[in-house]
């Protein structure tokens, strides 16, 4: 089971609603919440999609190791 994520986000001063929502979704995708949701709701992944996800994960791991 995935770890629970508690996310509290407050709008910045003079921040528009569109910008706030964009920032919110950016944080969600960075935490992997959207990806987890899609994995749980989908039953079948195309082989090209699996390859693309593996490649993305490898790239993230390599970037973290370099830093």
Image (cartoon, rainbow, N blue to C red):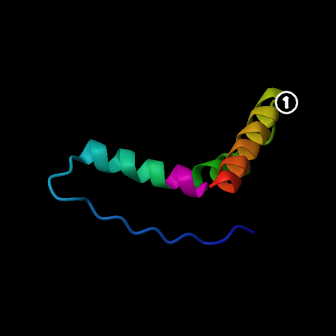
Name the residue: 85% across, 30% down: 47
**Farthest residue, direction left:** 14
Can the viewer see residue 53?
A: yes
Q: In which quarter of the image is residue 52?
A: top right
How many numbered callouts? 1
Q: How crowded is mark 1: few (under 14 residues within 10 Å), some or many (20 or more)?
A: few
Q: Position of residue 36 (x, y in %)?
A: 67, 53
**Farthest residue, direction top:** 48
Can the viewer see residue 45?
A: no
In the image, residue 60 lies in the stretch drawn in magenta: no
Q: Label 1, on which residue?
A: 47
Q: Position of residue 51 (x, y in %)?
A: 81, 33
Name the residue: 71% across, 42% down: 59
Q: Position of residue 14 (x, y in %)?
A: 14, 53
Q: What element carries label 1?
A: helix
Answer left or right for 44 relative to 8.
right
> Which SS type dominates the magenta stretch?
helix
In the image, residue 29 lies in the stretch drawn in magenta: yes
Answer left or right for 62 relative to 24.
right
Residue 27 position (above or below residue 47): below
- Report the magenta residues as a range: 28-32
Answer left or right for 44 relative to 2.
right
Q: Which of 19 and 57 is in front in this view?
A: 57
Name the residue: 59% across, 56% down: 33
Name the residue: 66% across, 54% down: 64
Residue 52 position (above or below residue 15): above
Q: Position of residue 27 (x, y in %)?
A: 47, 54
Of the 4 image quadrants, the one containing the C terminus is bottom right
Q: In which quarter of the image is residue 32?
A: bottom right
Of the 4 image quadrants, the one containing the N terminus is bottom right
């Amino acid at each position: 089971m995935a770890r629970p994520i508690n996310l509290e986000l407050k709008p910045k001063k003079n921040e528009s609603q569109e910008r706030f929502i964009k920032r919110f979704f950016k944080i969600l995708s960075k935490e992997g919440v959207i990806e987890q949701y899609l994995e749980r709701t989908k039953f079948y992944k195309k082989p090209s999609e699996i390859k693309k996800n593996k490649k993305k994960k490898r790239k993230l791991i390599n970037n973290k190791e370099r830093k």
